[in-house]
Image: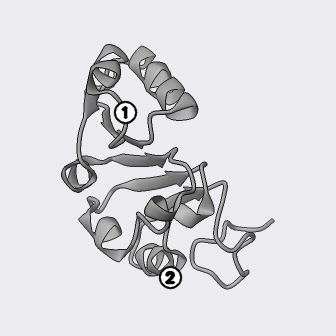
Amino acid sequence: MVIVGFSRIGSRVVRLLRDLDLARVLVVDPVADPAAIRAAGAEPAPLADALPQADVLSLHAPALPETRHMIGAAQLAALPEHAVLVNTARGSLVDTAALEAACTAGLHAVLDVTEPEPLPPTHRCTPCRT
C-alpha cells in the first residue's frame, strides 16, 4: 500500500492500515518527518520508488501548485498492472487525460474526487450507473 500525503487524513489511514497487519505501507510526503512515519508503522519513500511497489495507491495530498497533476502518465505507467488508484483527496492531483488512458489500458480507479467534477459520462473512469 502506498499513501501519498501524511497529514491528518493520510496519517490516520496509515494507523488504520497498521491494524490490518499489512506486510508493508509506504508513505510519500516530502515534508513529513520520516521518524513520525516510521512511528506510525510505515516507511517513508520517494514517489518514484514507491509506485512500482503499489498494490493500492491512495492519495491524501493537498491541492497545491506543486501537487497539481503529480500523478500523470509516467506515474500511472509505473504502477504494477494489478494496482488500484484511490483518490479521496483532490481531483487536481491526477492528470485526467492520463487517468482515462490508464483506465482504458486496465487500471482500476476508485474516485471520490475528479477534475472536472463530475467526469463526463463518456470518460473511461466513470463509475457504472444503475
The residue at the point 44 percent across, 81 percent down is 101
Name the quadrant of the C terminus: bottom right
* Foreground tag (2 vs 1): 1
Element type where label 2 sits in the image: helix
Q: Quadrant of the N terminus?
A: top left
Give the amino acid at mark 2. Ala
Does 104 appear above or below 37?
Answer: below
* Residue 124 vertical placement versus 83 (above, below): below
Residue 29 lies in quadrant: top left
Q: Position of residue 27 (x, y in %)?
A: 33, 37
Q: In the image as oriented, which residue stretches furthest toward the right?
A: 130
Colour scheme in use: one colour
Residue in view at x 39 percent, y 78 percent: 105
Residue at label 1? 32
Per the image, the residue denoted by label 2 is: 97
Specify few, some or many for label 1: CA neighbours under 10 Å numbering under 14, 14-19, or 20 or more: some
Chain-order first, disc 2 or disc 1:
1
Q: Position of residue 55 (x, y in %)?
A: 33, 47
Q: Residue at x 44, y 61 (%)?
A: 66
Q: Is residue 116 left or right of residue 10?
A: right
Q: Residues within 10 Å of mark 2 (few under 14, many from 20)?
A: few
| Residue at image point 55% right, 49% down | 62
Which numbered tag is attached to residue 54?
none
Q: Residue furthest left?
A: 49
Q: CA distance from mark 2 to mark 1?
A: 29 Å
> Relative to residue 26, is residue 111 drawn left or right?
right
Residue 86 placement (x, y as % from top left): 51, 51
Secondary element at image label 1? loop
